[in-house]
């Protein structure tokens, strides 16, 4: 039974048939609470807090991610997560949150991963090696006798 079916059944039960004015004794009449849309939006905001927080933390190290983890993008992610979370009974207090979040959020994690790869590629450029001073042309290089090495592997002179 879907959530919409449950809501329709509850609404039909609560509607007063014509001719009956007041509710029967002991009948539960709910107060005007939040609508389904309001509940969904609040749930989406709660889910959106996860990537928004992560984006804020990642933006400290990778400032180019500020344009990815915007409030609007995170809220859109939260709105898309709500139906999935309801379907699989995920909650923000449950143990399965980490796994569910990782699976659902690849769309926001992918740009972060790309930024990390770009940053690493820029840092991994080979550095020029310092040039060794040339030995004088007339002086032969001393050779260490076989087996005479320092503990660090350099030859004893």
Image (cartoon, helix red, strand yellow):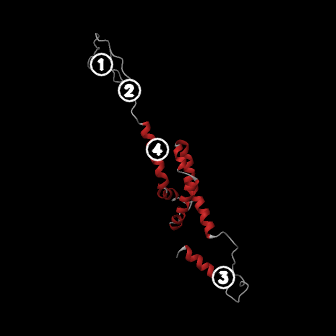
- Image quadrant where residue 74 sits: bottom right
**Marks 1 and 4, how far apart in space?**
47 Å
Residue 15 point in image, percent of width and height: 66, 82
> What residue is shown with label 2?
129
Disc 3 crowd rating (10 Å Cα; few below 14, some 14-19, many 20+) is few
Q: Nearer the viewer, mark 2 or mark 1?
A: 2
Q: Residue at x 34, y 20 (%)?
A: 150
Residue ID for mark 4: 116
| Relative depth, front residue between 24 and 157 | 24
In the image, 95: left or right of 30? left
Where residue 86 appears, as percent x and y from the top left, is: 54, 66
Of residue 145 and residue 78, the one placed in the foreground of this image is: 78
Q: To which residue does mark 1 refer? A: 148
* Image coords of residue 68 (percent x, y): 52, 50
Tally of numbered tags: 4
**Would residue 10 be found to the left or right of residue 125 on screen?**
right
Q: Which mark is residue 15?
A: 3
In space, the residues marked 2 and 1 are separated at their CA atoms by 28 Å
């Amino acid at each position: 039974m879907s959530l919409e079916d449950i809501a329709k059944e509850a609404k039909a039960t609560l509607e007063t048939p014509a001719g009956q004015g007041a509710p029967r004794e002991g009948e539960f009449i709910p107060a005007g609470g939040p609508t389904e849309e309001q509940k969904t939006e609040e749930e989406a905001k709660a889910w959106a807090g996860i990537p928004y927080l992560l984006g804020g933390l990642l933006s400290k190290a990778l400032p180019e991610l500020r344009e990815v983890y915007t409030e609007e993008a995170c809220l859109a992610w939260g709105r898309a997560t709500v139906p999935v979370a309801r379907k699989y009974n995920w909650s923000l207090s449950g143990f399965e949150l980490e796994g569910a979040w990782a699976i659902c959020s690849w769309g926001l994690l992918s740009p972060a991963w790309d930024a990390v790869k770009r940053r690493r590629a820029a840092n991994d450029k080979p550095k020029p090696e310092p040039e060794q001073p040339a030995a004088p042309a007339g002086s032969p290089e001393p050779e260490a006798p076989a087996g005479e090495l320092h503990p660090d592997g350099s030859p004893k002179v």
